[in-house]
Amino acid sequence: MPDAKAPRTTGYFIGGASFAAPPLAPGLYVVSTPIGNLRDITIRALETLAAADQVLCEDTRMSARLLDHYGIRTPRKALHEHNERARAEGIAAEVAAGKAIALISDAGTPLLSDPGFPLVRALREADLPVFAIPGPSALLSALAVAGLPTDAFSFIGFLPTKAGARGKALAALAGRTETLVFYESPRRLDDALAAMAEHLGADRQAAVALELTKRFERVNRGALGELAAHFAGEETKGEAVIVVAGAEEPATPAEADWLAALETALADQPLRGAVDEVAARFGLKRKEVYDAALALKAAR
């Protein structure tokens, strides 16, 4: 009869071949998983998921497809937006007691518009170890193929679901000059694109990435107005990633132009009024205009 207290056998399978997973140090392991294609998993991620004492899943049914595919039998528990705050303290206590616990979301990197932040914060506040096991990310995958600048970008995530709040959020982003990256539900993709065309500009270049890494992967590129018209009323599968070009950098006014305007304003206005007028008209810092005004007065 097998020993009931024997340690659980840890390992995983790739293409029918069995591999042993090395033991893990105690801690929370934030593990990135494929966003569609199961072959995008890393060896380190497989080892971590197989050797962990427990895998925390956003949805255990969704994660079963990945874990069962690689023969990983680690016990699984659900950790999602409705229970993560209540469970964080207990999980931190398990890590403090010496357990290695893996955290995964349904797809991609946890915490990016997915559960996990309250748990990671709880462990950090308790001075407990948290390890990143990097890998797939819909955000970076879409950014890499969008054909838009990548030197500076902001991840916005999901926009508000209500039209008024969504429009207000987009209006606040309209002047941002870096590339913007959004996630969107297939049910709201058409509404989101229409709102972006309205508040960011119909001519603003963008890309909509769908089914990334899957068989029917597609990336539609064009102006926001064109994309809004293309997806109007269309039903899509899975979450979309929308990558939008930043606003154009405002043109820097020629120094000679604003200095000439300042000299004219000083001729019939008090210094303060002239400075305020020119700074507002040319989009300049008030101190720069003020210093120039003092220099012009001193030169008279």
Image (cartoon, rainbow, N blue to C red):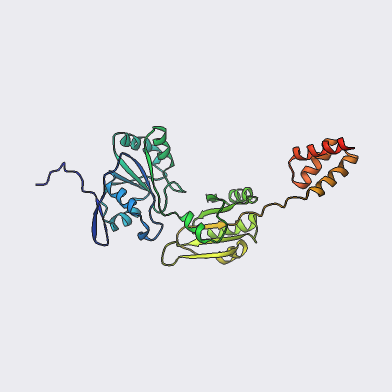
In terms of depth relative to the viewer, which is nearer, 193 or 207?
207
Q: Is residue 25 left or right of residue 295?
A: left
What is the x, y in percent for residue 279?
77, 43
How many marks the image carries: the answer is 0
Q: Nearer the viewer, residue 187 or 104?
A: 104
In this view of the protein, can residue 141 be seen by the observer? Answer: yes
Residue shown at 78% from the left, 50% from the top:
254
Residue in view at x 60 percent, y 51 percent:
178
Where residue 217 sits: x, y (%)?
45, 65
| x 24%, y 54%: residue | 19
Q: Nearer the viewer, residue 136 or 81?
A: 136
Q: Is residue 131 shown above or below 108?
A: above
Q: Quadrant of residue 7?
A: top left
Which of 149 and 182 lies nearest the eye of the viewer? 149
Percent from the top left, x then y, of residue 92? 35, 36
Q: Is residue 179 left or right of residue 16?
A: right
Q: Quadrant of residue 42?
A: bottom left
Q: Residue furthest front?
A: 299
Work out whether residue 188 can be spotted: no
User: Which residue corresponds to the image point at 40% horizontal and 60% vertical from the top-left?
Assistant: 36
94 w.r.t. 18: above or below: above
Is residue 292 found left or right of 209 in the rendered image? right
Residue 66 in the figure: left or right of residue 186: left
User: Residue 255: image x %, image y %?
Assistant: 78, 48
Q: Quadrant of the C terminus?
A: top right
